[in-house]
Image (tube, coloured by chain):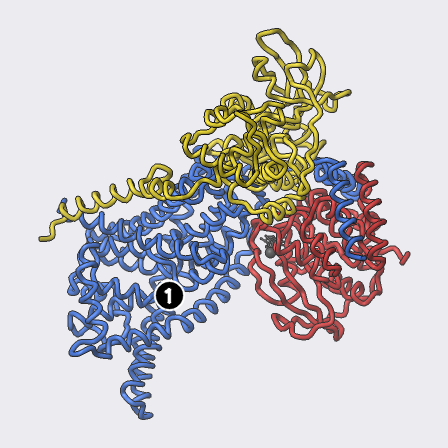
Amino acid sequence: MKKDNIENLIALSNDLRWQIGDDFHDNLTEGIYADAAEIVSAAVHKKDEKGKLRFDARIDKIITSRTWGFPLMFLVLATVLWLTIVGANYPSAFLGNILLDHIHPFLKTLATNIGFPIWLNGFLIDGVYLAVAWVVAVMLPPMAIFFPLFTLLEDFGYLPRVAFNLDNLFKRAGAHGKQALTMSMGFGCNAAGVVATRIIDSPRERLIAIITNNFSLCNGRWPTQILIATIFVGAVVPQSFSGIASLAAVIGIAVLGMGFMFLTSWALSKTVLKGEVSTFNLELPPYRPPRFWKTIYTSLIDRTLIVLWRAIVFAAPAGAVIWLISNLHIGDITIAAWTIDLFNPFGFLLGLNGVILLAYVVAIPANEIVIPTILMLTVLVTGISGGAGAGVMFEADSANATGDILRSGGWTLLTAINLMLFSLLHNPCSTTIYTIYKETKSVKWTVVASILPVIMGFVVTFLVAQIWRILA
Amino acid sequence: MDTLPKSACEACPQFNANGLKKLGINTTEFDFVVALAGNPNTGKSTVFNSLTGLKQHTGNWPGKTVTRAEGGFEYNNQKFKLVDLPGTYSLLSTSEDEEVARNFILFGKPSVTIIVVDASRLERNLNLVLQVLEITDRAVLCLNLIDEAERNNIEVDTRSLARDLGIPVVATSARYYRGIPELIQTVSDLANGRIHCKPHRIKNIPENIEKAVQKLSIELKKEFPEIPNSRWIAFRLLEGDRHIIELLRKGEFVI
Amino acid sequence: MYSPVWALSLFIGISILLFLLFRPEKGWFWAIRKSNINNQKIVIEDILKLLYHSENQDKILNINDITTSLNEPESNILESVNEMARHSLILIEGENVRLSESGSDYALRMVRAHRLWEKFLAEKTGFAESDWHHIAEKKEHELTDQDTDYLASVLGNPQFDPHGDPIPTKTGKVADIKGIALSDLDVNHLGRIIHIKDKPDIIYKQILAENIHIGSQVRVVEKDSNRIVFHCEGEAFKLAPIIAANITVSLLKKEYISEDNVARLSMLNENEYATIIGISKEMRGESRRRLLDLGFVKGANVKVDLLNPLGEPKAFLIKGTSIALRNNQASKILIKKD
Ligand SMILES: Nc1nc2c(ncn2[C@@H]2O[C@H](COP(=O)(O)OP(=O)(O)OP(=O)(O)O)[C@@H](O)[C@H]2O)c(=O)[nH]1
Ligand SMILES: [Mg+2]
């Protein structure tokens, strides 16, 4: 009985809707705004009719101007990166000194004294501890500088202006201007960037933003870029320019990433994700002077905790795996050496080597541990006595020493450049992959988002390697 | 029912600073659920942080928060669970980006809803406020960013607002903790039924829609005599909201 | 054995091959796959629709008409017609072909699916208006009855599709369109566009290119045997009568909007103020709602807040907030300059 009544009710609502016509929503919203206007006119008094502060208007004029808009954006990016690269050196050296040069030997002796068996000693302290320590020493300082700077810009209100300036490019690529915002979040962490795509309200453009977020260098990859650029790119120019050259190389890779982001968005929206952009509306908030010290303080504390947590969750088991594969044997050789031999020919074709490829397989859980893994594996295959023994992940004392180890592993400028490219173009880390799955709820798109960048990485490094060799 | 809410600080008992405890993410047992609704970038997460002591990310752009976050605080021995929501422009739309917020405000059964608005852009923000007031009668208007309004030479008469909207209004500047004590006190008063609201109902509706709404409302009341906001459901039925139609069919009303 | 030149050539070769195989639409892979799909169902459904539309215009078709109107090999069509007769979807009377009752039902279901999908494309996606018909033409064959019912409920059981054609209900009811052709509207009379025929394609594309769309108000200002001149949303249009005949209007008694000074928001210059008089009907669904919610309602004041280094989007100041919109959206907001 009741069921019928409800069906009647729904039928009645359908009839009424047809009578009212499709102006219903317009009329209702207009009605609400009319009420709002009445209420506001009674309650709000403006002393002067200026809609916007003069100060705000003036900043906006410059930030979005034809002449200054784009150079300013570039300058801001360069400044943030420069401060990060230069500023991170000192705390990194300091932390490396304490965690790796002092605490590590101390723990080793302690474990021996307590009477740990050799394998447990190696596994826990050379594997797990060193992985965590390396991540803390190398990852933490750049992030502790990068994030507060980024948060300051964010609090000031700069990000929406970037999206505003860049939207036309996104439009031409068939994407949504708010992708600029999610891309910026990706510079911190791709998983966060993927979640942030929820602000894009149409599914097609959102999917594009999710798939291409990986082209934003995340904090796990900045240190790799910075380190390799310093060692190899900085070395080919005269000493006094080496800082600038390595900065330029890192910025170049970041900008290249954006280029790939546009290219991939465009290709996707011309093929599998066809369609026009449906809507774009972006609110530009007023500028708000950030609370400088508070922002610095909170983003520092905040990030430190997150980084430590991630280091423990991901780097530790990966460190253990590294120790295992370089200490377990297949026949005469270790699993690590065996796999490296297997990967070497393919690596050579890409201008990389087996060590790098294996490192990327091991480092799927976290990009942060790519470099220490590479170092450790290089020592393993070359047999030089740089590190502390098989399966010990270490930070070489200085960039120079790191460079020496790598060069003795057969590295050239080409290897370095291709590593930087491959670090930009490879699969997202496991957290990001999982996040993509949660957000899209689709295995298909998760696979596409994970595989596509690797394929692009292979193609790009392959091409660079062949052309390099032909020209050289 | 008829006690008109006044501006919070005058009407309510004094704020008891000793009775406040920030509980962080510890929200296992609680007496009341409080939702934070509002347009994007009005300071919801900032209010949330100052009440719970947590560190939800805030940022000066609309869309910073995209997922629901929960935290708690205790006031005068009662535990409140606070829910920070993504910003939303309207409850009438069906767009995906606003789904999380819309669903919680409509179906999450909050004991009290704090509607956070930007004091300098009140008219635009009232669009959402008036919609929320169609649904609930336990709400408080948090007139945030009042420092900015002052800088812009905008004066807001909270008494007149409270009278017109029929709910308590608290002026705050969440970033500097201004007005937050009054807000806590008002929320507690609302939750415990010490303040009664008489929320504004939308008046300027074209005649043909008003008629249709009334017709539907009457039918709805016949079927479900106990529901408080038949008018809102009528609006949604006219819009053809599938969610509401399904709920009707199932005969369960969460709102 | 390895040489970079050799590797590079091999790579280029493979790339070209992959391109030829998989390039969109024309790739060999797609072509092979397409030819393998059994398309008798599609042909049958197309014939049903053809018959339905003709019978609606009181035209009876014969088999010859069908083979010439459909872009399919004759043998396929004849086979399908036989198949249809066997399932008594059609009645064959000599040369003439008519729909049976069950055939009519089937055709109505197809029309319903087609128009609902067009409505869906208009409301929920960003596909260009000129693509809707073609996409729906493919999609209608894939939708089951459950799909269409679900679609209808998602869209709020709409009565008309975006061209103004009625959408048959589940039970087969079809609403009438009451109106006259634009070519029959007298000078200085007002009408509202309620229907634009989406066939033939050339004429439809021409109308779309003029930016004329359903729901807008028109006023004829001049008319002779060669052309009709009319005002619509602040612009003057000239159309040949045969094109205007494809547009149906309903007569309006009084003018809702005074049309003087009407412009589009995209045409607003810096430092000018304007009042919004409405959002064009071409702006639909979610996007329309969002604009309304952002405060672009009748009577609101706007001005340009920020120009863009790349030309668009521009930011507009509305109800105290700066909102950036792309030109194609701003051009659908009608304003009156102050
Ligand atoms: N001056 C001033 N700034 C404030 C105040 N409250 C918040 N803000 C700033 O306003 C910006 C937005 O605050 P949020 O708390 O992130 O806003 P939200 O409502 O959570 O925004 P969404 O999550 O995007 O919906 C931040 O930069 C805050 O620092 C205030 O009372 N005064
Ligand atoms: Mg927030």
- Note the chain letter of the red one: B
Residue that appears at 70% across and 22% down? C179
Residue that appears at 31% across and 85% down? A120
- Note the chain letter of the yellow one: C
Residue B184 visible: yes
Q: Quadrant of residue B109?
A: bottom right
Q: Quadrant of ligand 2?
A: bottom right
Quarter in which the N terminus of chain B is drawn: bottom right
Q: Position of residue A278 (x, y in %)?
A: 53, 39
Q: Quadrant of residue C89?
A: top right
* Colour assignment, chain A: blue
Q: Position of residue C293 (x, y in %)?
A: 66, 42
Residue A234 visible: no
Residue that appears at 69% across and 23% down? C192
Residue that appears at 60% across and 25% down? C196
Would you say C156 lies left or right of A456 here? right
Identify the subunit bearing mark 1.
A
Under circle 1, the secondary element is: loop
Would you say C92 lies left or right of A42 here? left
Above or below: residue A173 compared with residue A203:
above
- Looking at the rendered structure, the kind of residue marked 1 is Ala
Residue assigned mark 1: A366
